[in-house]
Image (cartoon, rainbow, N blue to C red):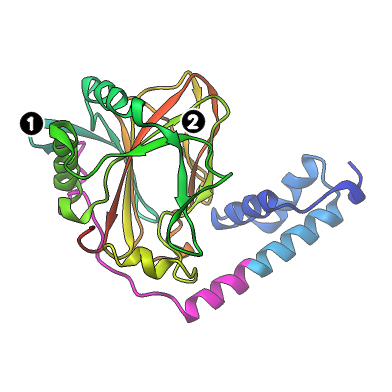
């Protein structure tokens, strides 16, 4: 591969940062790039430029770092393997401290998953994201799924799931948004993003009036796709497999990239992926 044809992409920059934060030595990162076909001079330039930009960004961010707030948190003192929530036992499959990520097994039963899909199916429409300029919503090319929202407490099933999540993460039901159900067909994905509302965007003030910042997310898998569809955390090289009934919880104590909660939905390779997402706010969501 010729140096002239080699472009230092955003994907490469993310990979370099991830390797550096994982403790890899600079010479080992360069060696890995050379082994994969990069010219050594280009590899060194990419490494130096990327790490310099990263250090500058971190330094600038610390100057105006938003204050940390209280966040939802499962009762994990003593490293339990199971959490009893009402009559249900939820498995603790994996935990991370920084970022705060907890992978949960069996949060929903198969019957609950199937029922959610059937309730949501007739109401699906092209998924939208928050319009950062107005605080409204818009179709975004980064999110290629179909989705819908249930009102909070809409029916017995939704109410039961919301209560279970509230007890699991020790956060009041009224501080949660309505449950969202999404369907991803083959090839559909959600590019890496943060769930908090960026304070720098002009539309954020309008969004925050409905309950403050988002502080945590629970993604529940309603089926198991044949291939693909993992929930990815690219900054920490973590992929959570979408297994029916399981879930991944993560929290972010401030609306800032230093929470390391950048995440996305990898493309579905075969079959469909159905998920239900619950976002939690600082205050009462209206």
Helix, strand or loop: magenta stretch: loop
Picture layout, residue 196 above or below residue 153? below
Q: Looking at the picture, how far across and down is residue 232, in whole percent?
A: 49, 41
Residue 110 seen by the camera:
yes
Viewer-side residue, 67 vs 46: 67
Q: Is mark 2 on a helix, strand or loop?
A: loop
Callout 2 crowding tier (Cα within 10 Å): few <14, some 14–19, many ≥20: many
Q: In this view, does 77 lie to the left or right of 30?
A: left
Q: Residue at x 22, y 25 (%)?
A: 112
- Across and down, in percent, residue 168 comes to 17, 44
Which corner quadrant holds the C terminus?
bottom left
Taking the image as shown, residue 5 lies to the left or right of residue 159, namely right
Residue 151 point in image, percent of width and height: 24, 43
Q: Distance between the residues labelled 1 and 2?
A: 30 Å
In magenta, the rendered stretch is 54-83
Residue occupying image coordinates x 28% and y 41%: 179
Closer to the N terminus: mark 1 or mark 2?
1
Residue 229's disc number = 2
- Camera-nearest residue between 200 and 109: 200
User: Is 157 covered by the magenta stretch?
Assistant: no
Residue 284, relative to residue 278: is it above or below? Answer: below
Percent from the top left, x then y, of residue 68?
Answer: 32, 70
Residue position for label 1: 87
Q: Does the magenta stretch include residue 68?
A: yes
| Label drawn at residue 281 | none
Depicted 281 relative to depicted 62: above or below: above
């Amino acid at each position: 591969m010729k140096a002239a044809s080699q472009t230092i992409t955003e994907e490469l920059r993310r990979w370099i940062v991830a390797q550096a934060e994982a403790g890899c030595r600079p010479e080992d990162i360069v060696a890995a790039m050379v082994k994969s076909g990069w010219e050594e001079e280009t590899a060194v330039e990419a490494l130096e430029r990327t790490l310099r930009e990263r250090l500058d960004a971190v330094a600038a961010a610390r100057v105006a770092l938003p204050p940390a707030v209280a966040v939802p948190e499962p009762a994990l003192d003593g490293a339990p393997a199971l959490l009893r929530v009402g009559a249900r036992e939820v498995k603790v499959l994996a935990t991370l401290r920084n970022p705060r990520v907890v992978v949960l097994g069996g949060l929903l039963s198969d019957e609950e998953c199937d029922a959610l899909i059937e309730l949501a199916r007739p109401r699906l429409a092209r998924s939208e994201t928050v319009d950062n300029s107005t605080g409204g919503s818009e179709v975004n090319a980064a999110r290629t799924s179909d989705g819908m929202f249930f009102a909070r407490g809409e029916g017995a099933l939704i109410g039961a799931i919301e209560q279970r999540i509230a007890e699991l993460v020790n956060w009041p039901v009224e501080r949660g948004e309505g449950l969202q159900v999404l369907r991803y067909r083959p090839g559909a994905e959600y590019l890496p993003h943060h769930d908090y509302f960026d304070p720098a965007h002009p539309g954020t003030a309008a969004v925050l009036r409905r309950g403050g910042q988002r502080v945590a997310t629970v993604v529940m898998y309603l089926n198991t796709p044949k291939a693909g569809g993992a929930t990815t955390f690219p900054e920490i090289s973590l992929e959570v497999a979408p297994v029916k009934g399981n879930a991944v919880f993560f929290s972010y104590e401030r609306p800032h990239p230093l929470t390391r909660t950048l995440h996305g939905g990898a493309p579905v390779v075969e079959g469909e992926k159905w998920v239900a997402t619950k976002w939690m706010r600082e205050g009462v969501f209206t």
